[in-house]
Image (tube, coloured by chain):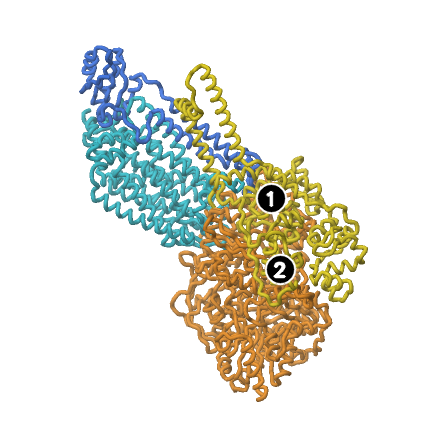
Chain colours: A blue, B yellow, C cyan, D orange
Amino acid sequence: MSKNTLYGIFDCELVLLAAVKEIRANKIEIKEVYSPFPVHGLDKALGLKETRMAITAFIYGCIGLSLAALMIYNIMIIDWPQNIGGKPNFTFYHNMPAFIPIMFECTVLFAAHLMSITYLIRNGLYPGGESDSPDARTTDDKFLMEIEVEGNVADVKAMLTKTGATEINEKDA
Amino acid sequence: MQPKIEDIFNMIRINNFKSCILLLAVVFTFSFQTSAQPDGAQIYKANCTACHMIGGGRLVGPDLQGITEKRTKDWLKKWINSSSELIASGDADAIAIFEEYNKSVMTDFYFSDEDMAALLVYLENPPVEEVQVASAAGATEHDKGMSGSTQMMIVALVLLTLVFILTSVKNSLKESLGQETETVPETLKNQTELFLANNINKLFVGLFIMIVVLKFAFDAMMGVGVTTNYQPVQPIAFSHKIHAGDNSIDCNYCHTSARTSKHSAIPSANICMNCHASIVSGTTTGTTEIQKIYDAIGYDPETRTYIEGYEQKPIEWVKIHNLPDLAYFNHSQHVTVGQLECQECHGAIEEMDVVKQESELTMGWCIECHRETEVKMEGNDYYTQMHEKMKEKYAGEKITVDKMGGLECGKCHY
Amino acid sequence: MQKEAEIRDPLILGNKSFHDITKDISKPVEGKANKYWWILFSLSMVLFIWGVLCMAYTIGTGIGAWGLNKTVNWAWDITNFVWWIGIGHAGTLISAVLLLFRQKWRMSINRSAEAMTIFGVAQAALFPLIHMGRPWLAYYVFPIPNQFGSLWVNFNSPLLWDVFAISTYFSVSVVFWYIGLIPDFAMLRDRMSAKTAPMKKQLYSFLSFGWSGKAKHWQRFEEVSLVLAGLATPLVFSVHSIVSMDFATSVIPGWHTTIFPPYFVLGALFSGFAMVETLLIIMRKVVNMEAYITIKHIEYMNIIILLTGSLVGTAYITELFMSWYSGVEFEQYAFLNRATGPYWWAYAIMMTCNVLTPQLYWFSSIRKSFVATFILSIFVNIGMWFERFVIIVTSLHRDFLPSSWTMFSPSFIDIGIYLGTIGFFFVLFLLYARTFPVIAQAELKSIVKSSGSEYKNKK
Amino acid sequence: MTKAKKYWKGLAELNNDPLVDKLKQNEFVEEIPVDEFLGDKELPASSTSRRDFLKFLGFSTAAATLAACETPINKAIPYVIKPEEITPGVANYYATTMYDGHDYASVLVKTREGRPIKIDANKSATNARIQASVLSLYDSSRLKNPMKGGVDTDWSTADAEIIAKLNEIKENGGKIAILSSTILSPSTKQLIADFSAAYGNVSHIQMDAVSYSGMLDANEASFGVRVLPTYSFDKAEVIVSFGADFLGNWLSTDHAKQYVTARNPKNGKMAKHYQVESTLSLTGSNADDRVQIKPSEQAGLLSNLYSALNGGTADSRIAKMANDLANNAGKSIVVCNSNDAQVQTLVNAINNKLGNYENTMSLSNPSYLKQGNDAEVAALLEEMNAGKIAALITYNVNPSYTLQNAAAYNAGLAKVGLTISTSLYNDESAAKMMYACPDNHNLESWGDANPSNGVYTLMQPTISPLFKGRQFQESMMAWMGKSDYHTYLQNTYSSIDWNKSVHDGYFTQNQAASTVSSFAVAVPSFDLGKADGIEFEMTEKISMGDGSQSNNPWLQELPDPLSRACWDNYLTMSASTARDLGITNWNVSNGALNGNMVNITVNGTTYNNVPVMIQPGQAVGTVAMAVGYGRTAAGKCGDGIGFNAFTLGNGTATLEVVGGEYEFAATQLHHTMMGRDIVKETTLADFINDPYAGNHQVTYATHDGFKPASEVTLWDEFDHSTGHFWNMSIDLTSCIGCSACVISCHAENNVPVVGKEEVRKSRDMHWLRIDRYFSSDMTKELSAEEKISAITMYAEMEEPSGNPETVFQPVMCQHCNHAPCETVCPVAATSHGSEGQNHMAYNRCVGTRYCANNCPYKVRRFNWFQYSDNDKFDFNMNDDHGKMVLNPDVVVRSRGVIEKCSMCIQKIQEIKLDAKKAGTRVADADAQTACSSACPTNAIVFGDVNDDTHQVQAMKKDTRSYALLEHLNTDPSVFYQTKIRNKA
């Protein structure tokens, strides 16, 4: 049986937010919402899961820190220890105060870059990638709600208009 | 020079080779005399073998079998120190020999009295068999390290044959089941397609290729400026194999300063003349090549005399082992003090008809050796005091060059 | 839905709707440059080329082309380096720290501030390279395996810390900046019609990475921005602390000071904000952004400048006090010499521009005037340059042994290179102003409802 | 120098078979290598700054790129016939004698591959000029051919013509004059005698550029012998010098050694040294008590001193001195620089009165170092101008430059029928003479010298002549139709073991000295007339001497120990006189020193726009200028620098201040210690009471009591107890500031010369500098008493006193064991050696200069430009010949890297290797750096503190030893010994 996709377009984020809540209250599955800027509370309204970006950042940071420590330990203590200004390089611990700056920098370096890369990958963003937004205006001033409907499209349309959609487009799948 | 894949393989080889050599190094140290007592055999080998034999008949100079009976000790002393003086002094025997060996002069050797004594002792009772240079062994060893390329090829071959066998097996099975068979290339093609169908596999393949490429790029970079196997053509086709190998002339006989100086100087033409004043012809190209020496120094092989007022032209050898100026290397430190054999860095010279650069001569190569090589302190008073201290400092560990500061910048760069 | 106190002045003037904002932001990109832009651009281009020539000459003949000598081995090179790094700080601070503090007013300036950071750091990064005697061996400062055994770098050296700190800071800033840019590029992409501007369309669709503004993406976007901000903040402080350690860890009287890290960071923010002001006041003219960069923004920044300026002043006083209190004659003389020695004038300029002039911001009339702010910001920039000059040259020229005391005067090459970097900086910035969304419009739109003038007036 | 020296084989092989004969030729006439190197054009000049200049010999490595691959093909060209005693890569040492008519020394020459590269002391001490003379050998401005009328010719034609002319003169009975410097060589004197025998009417006149004629005449009058006494300052307990710079330029180089022996505080007594002078001399700067007088007062004071010694009343200025002298009769020395026979007679009278003769100074064992006779020279000039001289041959002299009345000489020259110069250069005089028959440099010649009674030193060639010169003696013989001076020389000393003597470089044999009659002449007396008006005095710089080596860039760039200026001579003037005249010196924006200029007229000669250098210690109302400058035909480095003070002569000066600024090149711009504890000093009295006097270690409060800096450390120390630990002790009491070490360092370490402009920019490259500090009237104590503000105090401290106390402090890399420079290098180009040196790997250096900034001693030098093979720096490193002096064991640094003192690590490595080969421990005597071996007073002692047999170990424990800037706890391997003055 046919499956239609409805695009409800809103002008104001506040209206949109309300609409989302109401529609979901009516057990209508919202597929996706496109907005020109982050609308606060939208993720909750849509019932999206907490993102775990921060956790990845933490892990990457730890990796960076340990890699830095390992590198310095190998270079300064193991591979070729030198007497540099009489600074004791007998153990890593002795010489460590001098290494802290770089270990810190490496931590940040890894955390920031790897997290950003993960972010791009998870969002499927890459140089020259194609936008899959159904309506170009969503990056300008319009908010778009995408709903997949099976069966009576009319109710959903009505619901949309009721909740303040200024425009409703329909696409047959 | 352009970095070549070969270089990388050579690197691999060198390492195996070096480890063999290091084994040998230990072996030598036992056979090597480190006592302060001068060793007649050594002196004889280093200075006399080129022109004399014991009981082997006449070479350039007379056979020295029983020479000590024939002549008095101090006469020999005089003669060895400066034959020309002895002749000038009008000594009958001296002149006789001078005439006999058509007026070719024996080189003067300024031996210390101890050395002279030792030498004479040796001449009095020479060993039945002359001591052979241990280094020859080093040569035979050095080819055993198999080159990386051949290893890889063998592996590839094995795999191919495997594929072949399996396919044929499969085919025979299929035939028995009456399905249509497929050729080896087809199998490979299908299998790979099957394999690459999976994204994960794609990813891995991609990664693998990337790593391989990086590895090669890296090795190429590391190979820049490394001139291992540099083997230029020399103005005179001088064969170390004939001289150092077959005739087992000691390296120091020609490269005189290796034991005393930073350079193991390239021999000057007059050193060649010590022998080639009488050896005027050689097998194959020998004669023409020897002639080149005469052209340089102005010697007439017919009359066996030096041409008066001849304008001598130096022989322009091509330098093979080039260290950058910023690195100070001293032969005597390694040969005399470190007691290394020439072959450890220069390879089996005595087997090379045309000499080539055996080692990388990179700083890494020096460092590696300094990290591994043990300092030979025994019997050298210079070390006694610090050796005591170091033994307790590095209890148990072997005292390598780097422990003596052999990795410090200033030791080679100033 | 964010709330904002009524009494706050609007941060966006002229009843802008979302679409107006879109239009305004993309105008400079779509439209033609006005004459101010061309004048400034050609001017900076000339300087830039001149600078490049001077650098080429230096690398060709040797550092001797500069005014340095056996006693003063660093002067303008490192002065400029630290100055630019300092300038490079406000950007990340604004976008990072102010983001953490949820300061809305940052939104209309952070994009440009970050651009400034990146371009500033790029200038700074030039100097450690060209000040080397043998720049073609610069790769020696990275721990790369090599034929030499392997020969490694020296992790005890503050200069090496610099290498890591600056490269980290630079790259992280770029990433932070770009993550924020993606939605705005997407906006531009969607405005460009494939017919009229196919090139631009392609360019921006490439740059926008196929952003479509899905709810989940925005959620991640916000979190990432937040975390990056959290990472960038300590980074900002670490970078200039490490730069200050070039001096603090040395033995030279006047350098060997534990106060340096905080003192340098403050100075950096101080000069950074000054430079932001200089730039924004120019930019709002050349790309007509009067509506978004309001006097309110300027005033907020002036307040920060007043604060940091006073703190820097306190640092100077502390320094003097400590040198006297230390009882070390070398220390005492070093600072006495700064104030009364041959370079007293440099010290005087530093004091006036950094400590006295910012105090004028106590008067709201000055605080709220574009002209006055512009002039004062220039003063601060000059003052901060002299601070670095004073620290580096006056400490070096008379250190421990009077026998090697001497002085420094710059060669025209020194000056040329400095001007060159200024030129380079403005070239980059002006190009940016014509091709990038100079304001984080996506974020800005999110506060129209709360801080836009129209909505404020409704209430 | 206990290094194993090789026997000179030349003679043993003379009568041997053809091969050895060839060897001999090759060894002497290395035609092949020299041409090889000079003729070889495709050999890029750059390759000559490589560490191995073997290429200069047959053993050349010429680089020619092959199309196929990018690595160059290096040719290795061995000798055709290797000289017997040359081993490529091993240095040979030859004992020989340096004498250029001004400086004399018996030296040891280090040669590599047949090239002399370094001069060290053998029998007598060396000074800076002797050290530098090895570079003068390679001076490409030397005459390369005999010349006639300024046109190159060849020897045969020149000889033929000259002999013809001489014979003609002989027939006409014309007079031939030989004008030479003091001739120390008995064989040469013999040769000249033969020459006069051959040509009849020959007169030989000796002249000294800086004349001692007055002294000689006085001695002749007083004692009937026209010789100089030999002094033994080591035996003296009171030393009084009236202007005589006996530590610097006055007579023998050995005085310094004797002087410090007499002044060793360890013995609990030091000779008291009074200096009475108008210009601050090196000697004056070391004096315990220095009296400033005008030159005109000298005679008066001397005669006042004489009367005081005979019970008269002494002038207040010299009362103490007179008293001390009286109490130390027979244990004192009075010397004077006056060239006035009368004054010197007075000095003789004083010494005679004190009974110093044959105690602290000896005429029975006389010195022959100076024999010039002004009267004879004057006579010669008259004869020349009267046209009475038919032929003039000059040797080792440059009269047109060094004579005060050079004009008269030049005029006379025109009237002489045949004029032959044998100068090495086409100098001021040679250019005016018909024939230039260039002599050989000492290092290319055979010869002998008889510096003092019974002592003979020999000269042997250490390199074959670089150019087509011929040594003077050979020329003389050629003109007598003879040849082979070498045999002639040998025959002069038939009785000695020739080979041994040549090897040792000296021998002694009894020599009859003319009998000394007792002092019996009327003692002249002068009154203490107070002359007003400004008086001029000519002085000698230790760098330039009489100017014969003024084309030597090392010497030109060697800063004067007192003014610290180089590449110049100038008028020195006291601050107060300058103030009166409205003259100042000031520093421009980059710190460089500028000064006003004056026109000066002395004895009718005027120089315009002469720069004035304000020199503390210059007596008020006097000005002085150094001779040796103002050369016009010295060569590319020496020409057109400064003014020729010879032509001025001593006398009253009229000064006229003129406009304009002059730009000096000074290596030290700040003159005082600013009240800092840099050079620790104390008095002998205090030192005897308290061995730690002036050197009480500062301690710092820690959680457990007061501790010295060295114990207040956070670090675990590296272990330096195994193996060697090289340290250096510098005794500030013995250091007289003579700067011999500086030149020695240049020669050993290939230190580049950068030229005046760069020095002005404070970019001198000296690895070893000798800091000079003057005392100031303002001290911390004073300011504390008088409540003077710190600002005023420091301002006034910058001004040195009018008659300051001077200290010299050699400063090179201190090789800190906690080196500030090492920690800051990002690429670890400088790190610490287990043997205590601070290593500098030039090839790793990227040139951030951070290390130089962080060095508290400021001893690191940066290569601002490419200093070798760069026409902008056209000195010895941009010159095919000049480069032959480079030490092959030390790299020539490239542009953009830091360099610094390596503690002569190449020498250390060498002695270690030698010891290893010999299987012995390193002997104290062998452990030498360039500076320590050059130091005439052993102020610099180097060695291994881990070895009980090394002197330096004791020095480190000495109560006087201290580390420079100890409070930084850099823990240097170089330490200093407190300076001790013998004053109340």
Which residue appears at 51% of the width and 75% of the height? D153
Q: Quadrant location of the C terminus of chain D?
A: bottom right
Q: Amino acid at mark 2?
A: Lys
Answer left or right for B360 relative to A22: right
* Camera sees residue D811: no
* Camera sees residue B26: yes
Q: Residues within 10 Å of mark 2 (few under 14, many from 20)?
A: many
Answer left or right for D924 relative to C327: right
Q: Residue D82 shows which numbered tag?
A: 2
Residue D160 at what x, y percent from top left?
56, 80
Residue D201 at what x, y percent from top left?
60, 85
Residue C446 at what x, y percent from top left?
26, 26
Q: Amino acid at mark 1?
A: Gly
Compared with residue A160, is residue B306 higher up or lower down, i.e. above or below? below
Please, which chain is the residue tagged with disc 1 on? B
Which residue appears at 66% of the width and 80% of the height? D521
How many numbered markers are drawn? 2
Is disc 2 in the same subunit as disc 1? no
Q: Between residues B96 and B49, which one lies in front from this camera angle? A: B96
Q: Quadrant location of the N terminus of chain D?
A: bottom right
Please, which chain is the residue tagged with disc 2 on? D
Residue D784 at what x, y percent from top left?
50, 52
Describe the element under mark 1 as helix, strand or loop. Answer: loop
From the image, tell me which residue sits under label 1: B347
Compared with residue C73, is residue C300 higher up or lower down, i.e. above or below? above
Answer left or right for C409 relative to D905: left
- Label 2 to label 1: alpha-carbon separation: 27 Å
Q: Between residues B373 and D643, which one lies in front from this camera angle? A: B373
**Quadrant position of residue D132:** bottom right
Q: Residues within 10 Å of mark 1 (few under 14, many from 20)?
A: many
Q: Between residues D218 and A84, which one lies in front from this camera angle? A: A84
Compared with residue B353, is residue D651 higher up or lower down, i.e. above or below? below
